[in-house]
Amino acid sequence: MVHSSNSEKGVNACTPPQNQFKLNIVTEKEKNDYRKALIPDSNKSFDSEFIRTTNLERTIIDKYGFEGLRLLFENRNSANYYKLSQFPNNSPWTYLNNKNLSEFIRYY
């Protein structure tokens, strides 16, 4: 839907604003709240948690721009890796938990 003020200016309603302002993540508490919210709940299904956390990542980037992206990368580099044979119970890769490194390499 095109608003009359936009159509008078010849702007398509689907065109994003050119000077879109991105907010700053102001406090460490906010950053910690996002970090906690990005942790998948192992008691819920992998699919639903993947969708929830992916949607939250997109929301953070949309709201905070580069600063949000930096928060996500810092979070990923410190929290989203699992040691071999220690995938969480809701992970689709739990069947690999009983393999040692040599078996894992041979499997793939």
Image (spheres, rainbow, N blue to C red):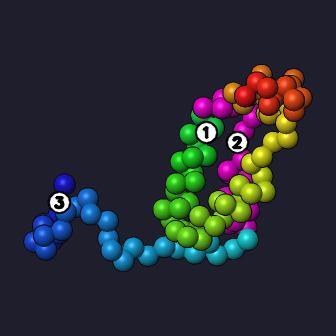
How far is mark 2 from mark 1, CA to CA?
7 Å
In the rendered structure, which disc, 2 or 1, sits on the residue that comes first in sequence?
2
How far is mark 3 from mark 2, CA to CA?
39 Å
Q: How many C-alpha atoms fall within 10 Å of the one at disc 3: few (<14), some, or many (≥20)?
A: few
Quadrant that contains the C terminus:
top right
Q: Which of 91 and 37 is in front in this view?
A: 91
Identify the amino acid type marked 2: Pro
Q: Nearer the viewer, mark 3 or mark 1?
A: 1
Hey, which quadrant is residue 5 in on the image?
bottom left
Tag 2 secondary structure? loop
Q: Nearer the viewer, residue 99 or 94?
A: 99
In the rendered structure, which disc, 3 or 2, sits on the residue that comes first in sequence?
3
1 up-or-down from 20: above or below: above
Residue drawn 53% across and 62% down?
61
Tag 3 secondary structure? loop
Q: In this view, does 72 lie to the left or right of 97?
A: left
How far is mark 3 from mark 1, CA to CA?
34 Å
Quickly name the residue at label 2: 40
Q: What stretch is highlighted in magenta?
A: 29-47
Quickly name the residue at label 1: 50
Q: Circles 3 and 1: CB distance less than 8 Å?
A: no
Identify the amino acid type marked 1: Phe
Q: Circles 2 and 1: CB distance less than 8 Å?
A: yes
39 is within the stretch colored magenta:
yes
Residue drawn 69% across and 65% down?
31
